[in-house]
Amino acid sequence: MTPSTTSRNFKQNKLLRAVIPLAFWLGVWQLAAFLVDLRTNGHGALLLPYPMLVAERLRLLAVQPAFWQAAAVTLGRIFAGFAVGAAAGAAVAAATSALRCADWVLTPAVKVIRAIPVASFIVLVLLWAPSSGWVPAIVSGLMVLPVLWGNVSKGVAQTDPLLLEAARAYRFGRGRTFRLVYLPSVLPYFASGCATGLGLAWKAGVAAEVLCQPKLAIGTQLYRAKITLETPDLFAWTAVVIVLSFLLEYVLGFLFRRLGGGKT
């Protein structure tokens, strides 16, 4: 078997692994919608609309400028919160790993943040934030911070002591030790934490939008579709959330693969 044939078979298998599950679950959805429609005498769209009906609603929404504005603003808010939360989590992990006093002071606070339910955070931040538009970003950041703190702390703890001993023997400075020893050890843990935290940030951010309802937001559109019983719109906006989540996850994974030379 030639390398070109192997590559072609790999691409075909990868395509099938994406298409077959999608086709299966769309078929399950279509069948479930048909059964609901039968049980409700033709009013099944209020409970479970057909996939084609949702696709049509999504097409109609996509030609409206407000659709893209809401998607872009939600994406910007949540990603900004995620980035700040990831940076803060990594910084806190570095502090708690290097300084005992920081560990005593900051570790309990991070554990409290991790234990508080998302709904409580949303309500509290809604009371304190200067405007409702800040709430999704702040909540997303708070959800990410404990995850990155845990992962980066573990990465620092798992750093090879022999490499650290060699760095001391060759009299590496702090910057060089960080770049050549700690960074390669921590990066896989940081990447894994970002992958987990991104999903948490995305779900928490959209949930915050549903509750606080800023002017331009996917969560606001989800809430309006729900109260007006526009179930196809509700499914269409949910599909947008899923697609944007996959897109963010892919972009983040691509960036880490580039940083890690394709290893992460």
Image: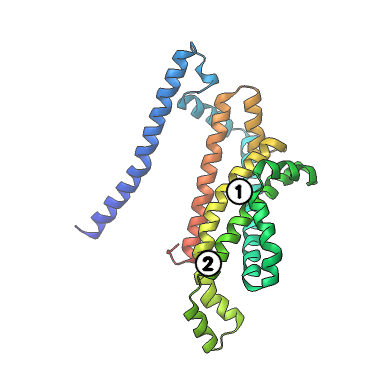
CA gap between label 1 and label 2 equals 22 Å
Q: Residue furthest left?
A: 1
Residue at horizontal 49%, vertical 85%? 166
Answer whether residue 208 is visible to the viewer in this image: yes
Percent position of residue 142, x then y: 66, 52
Q: Is residue 44 left or right of residue 73?
A: left
Percent position of residue 119, x then y: 67, 40
Percent position of residue 183, x then y: 54, 71
Residue at horizontal 62%, vertical 46%? 75
Q: How is the image coloured?
A: rainbow
Q: Residue furthest bottom?
A: 170
214 or 122: nearer the viewer: 122
Image quadrant assignment for residue 132: top right
**Which amino acid type corresponds to the residue marked 2 in the rendered image?**
Gly
12 or 203: nearer the viewer: 203
Q: SS for tag 1? A: helix
Q: Is residue 70 left or right of residue 159?
A: right
Image quarter hosting the N terminus = bottom left
- Label 1 belongs to which residue? 201
Percent position of residue 68, x then y: 61, 39
Q: Residue furthest top?
A: 41
- Label 2 belongs to which residue? 155
162 or 254: nearer the viewer: 162
Q: SS for tag 2? A: helix
In front of the other: label 1 or label 2? 2
Q: Is residue 196 left or right of residue 142?
A: left
Assess disc 2: are there few (<14), some (14-19) or many (≥20) residues with their C-alpha within 10 Å of its C-alpha: many
